[in-house]
Structures are given as C-alpha cells and as structure tokens.
Amino acid sequence: MNGSSLVTSLLWFVAILALIPAALWLLKRTPAGGAGANALMKNVAVLPLSASQRIVTVEVGTGDARQWLVLGVTPTSINTLHVMAPRENGDAH
C-alpha cells in the first residue's frame, strides 16, 4: 500500500466515524427516531419515590380526546393511579 492510498483510507475512516454521531443526532430529532409534534403519548412529569419506584404523568391522545394518566412505575409493574383532563398550559407543576 503506498502513502497516498493509506492517507485516503484514513480520511474515509475518520469521515465515517464523524458521521456516526451526526446520524444518531439527526435520527433522535426525526419522527422515525421517536420525535415529532404529533406524538400520541407525551411525558408530562416524573416524581422519583425511590431508586426503583416513581410516579409518572403522561399525556395520551390528541385534541379533545387528550387525557393525563398518572402511573405508578416499579421494576415489575405499571399501575394507573389516576386519569384526569390535561391542564391547559400543559404543565403538571
């Protein structure tokens, strides 16, 4: 392998390594990666109770069919604790 092809191979390797984080960043911000304005489920708030237990409020549905679910989450189960209409400002605090 001569010096020119070695430099070219090294440049391609560096370019591919640089593209991996860029592709992951882009995927995270596209609907295919889970992002999107029209998501049917949205995390509203999380309250950690212990290292393995938490209370999570999620918004499900769209338009007039939106609801907030208050869920108790443990390593072995997820239980619905309460169902309520969402607040107008979209903030659980």
Image (cartoon, grey):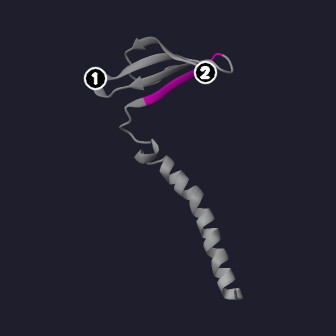
Q: Dots 2 and 1: beta carbons under 8 Å?
A: no
Residue stretch rendered in magenta on the structure: 42-49
When the figure is inspected, residue 47 is found, relative to residue 21, above or below; the finding is above
Q: What percent of the width, then of the height, locates residue 76?
A: 58, 19
- Quarter of the figure with the N terminus: bottom right
Q: Residue at x 63, y 80 (%)?
A: 8
- Dot 2 corresponds to which residue? 75
Q: Kindly indicate the quadrant of the structure image that contains residue 67.
A: top left
The secondary structure that dominates the magenta segment is strand
Residue 44 in the magenta stretch? The answer is yes
Answer yes or no: is residue 51 visible.
Answer: yes
Q: Position of residue 80 (x, y in %)?
A: 46, 14
Residue 57 screen position, x and y as percent: 49, 20
Q: Position of residue 83 (x, y in %)?
A: 41, 13
Q: Is residue 76 left or right of residue 90?
A: right
**Who's the residue at 35% across and 37% down the image?**
38
> What residue sits 38% from the left and 35% below the top?
39
Local SS, label 2 = loop
- Which residue does the numbered mark 1 point to in the structure image? 64
| Mark 1 residue crowding within 10 angstroms, few (<14) / some (14–19) / many (20+) | few
Q: Which of marks 2 and 1 is nearer the N terminus?
A: 1
